[in-house]
Image (cartoon, grey):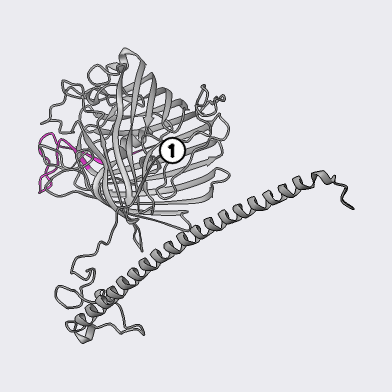
Amino acid sequence: MCAGWGIPFHRTPLIICALLAFAYSSSVYADDQTAEMRALIKAQSDKLDEQAKVLADQARLIREQSEFLERQRQALKGIIPASIQPQESASGGSLPEVMETINLSTGTKPQEGEDAYGTKKEKFKDTPLKVFWGKDGRLMFKSEDRNFIAHIGGFFQLDASFYSVSDSVQQLLPDRGLLAGSDMRRARLRSDGVCWNVVEWVMEIDFSRASDTTKDIISDPVPNVYINNMYIGLIDLPVFGNVRVGHIKEDLSFYNASSGRNIPFMERPNVWDAIEDPYIFDNGIMMSRTYLDDLLYVSLGLFMTNTRTGAFAVSPGAPLAFDVRVCYMPIYDEEDQHWMNIGATGSVRANPYERGTELPVGQTTVAPLVRAGISSQVPNIINTRPFYTREGTQLYTLCYNHSWGPFSMGAQYDGQFFNQSYVGGLPRSDGSLPDKVKPVGDLYFDGGAIEFLCFLTRGDHRTINKNFPCYGQVIPAENFSFARSGASGESAHGMGAWEVGVKYDLVRAQLEVPGAPVVQRGGYLNAITLGLNWYLNPNASVMANYIYTTGFFGTQKADGANQAPADGAFHSFGTRFQFTF
């Protein structure tokens, strides 16, 4: 054995041979690695050479472009007047700076709004529009910059009416009197909005009479499809506030200002029907403005009378009307759902001219608070028939409306004067009276209404429009539903908003025609209304009204015979199904 190794001597040659083989294989492997490394380095070197060539080409192109731009700049200096040459910067200026200051077609300074080639620059760009269904159930369009806000929609009301009336009362009314039936009370399409934050518009047309084919267009010129609101206006002007021009709803009272889709009973008060209804819409101009953080409201209006439905009228004297309305809100707390509005309106107006006689005429009519059928089938329970005066008419209204949580109330009084009135015509220029013309003196018609309302469902209340005092839309705190929601599958039961109300109406519109015997025209009435309203959601609602009416009724029969007024009473019941969008 070899000393110190402990290896048998006879195995030593084998070990030496193994060591020599290992050394040889290691040397061969090292040579292979060196060769691969050399090849990799050579490939990287070739790529760097190619990139260097590309960079050199790009540097050459940049140098050529810079030289070209410098030649262009020097050439432009030769044709640009010195007065409009730009001041060169430390870098010598640039072509874009020069092009912004001249018209390249003429060599002169471009006009305001033109680019370097004399083309008008685009001032306005298309604005993306957002379309959405608002929380009030209306289809709305709004631009991202809020310069454009628009609504396209409308509403319709389907009424059904029933009466319990004696034969004696039916004989006091024209034609066949009060008849049960149904009708489309209102069917309106509407577009409204604001553009450029300055201009507002409203276009509203009623189609509810579109199927009324019984009228004689010559003797009864009220159109079957007629205009309600249709105007253009400017908003938030200094001093003037809002200015509207067109076919406008006259600002006569809280109820007159309120839309027919937002009133709490099927019809407005009887006194509104007697005094304000003939003037609800007219051609004219109106200015309105609020003060004291929108708590004080003032409006002024100048209108042409006798343009209620047709939005057109001609007459010998162009009768005009001037309106003033002032409202004050001593209480307005939106968080506590508490508000109070007190308002007064005065109107001085000429009477419209009667077709055929061309005389200034007045007439007061009152229809029942539940109505069925086309316009010619709804009898007037009070009708003074035509009377004439050259003194015009003056009317005023006083309104009080108060809401606190689920409770609300409203009260209204209207009065109207007709001075030096006559029936059968007017005196001659010398003051003498033609045959059948009789004086009836100074006439004063008036009346009022008071109502109390209460929501039965939690969180529901009546709102007010501060900028145009009137009833706002009822939006239920909880929509009616009995199905499962589509997204989560959870139960989504809801009752909607339920409201009860009671209203008292009074109207006095009566005159006496001298003679033997004295003939009475018109009459008076009292009415009690009980109402139940169900607002399923902001779009759909159902109404039910019961009315007991008493009074002194009478009108002219269809054959022209005079019917003296007499005491009477009747019951009526009506329902309404309404959809707003």
- Residue shown at the point (24%, 64%) measured from the top left: 121
Residue 316 falls left or right of residue 533:
left
Q: Residue at x 87, y 51 (%)?
A: 2
* Residue 398 rendering spot, x and y as whole percentages: 41, 45
The span picked out in magenta is 421-446
Going by the numbered disc 1, the residue's amino acid type is: Asp
Q: Is residue 8 left or right of residue 361?
A: right
Dot 1 lies on which element? loop
In the rendered image, the quadrant that contains the C terminus is top left
Q: Is residue 473 above or below residue 25?
A: above
**x and y percent of residue 457 in the render?**
56, 30
Is 389 rendered above or below residue 188?
Answer: below
Q: Which residue is mark 1?
A: 136
For the residue pair 60 and 480, the one nearer the viewer reads as: 60
Task: Examine the image and state in which quarter residue 389 appears.
Answer: top left
Question: Magenta stretch: residue 437 in it?
Answer: yes
Task: Tell me if I can see residue 552 in this picture.
Answer: yes
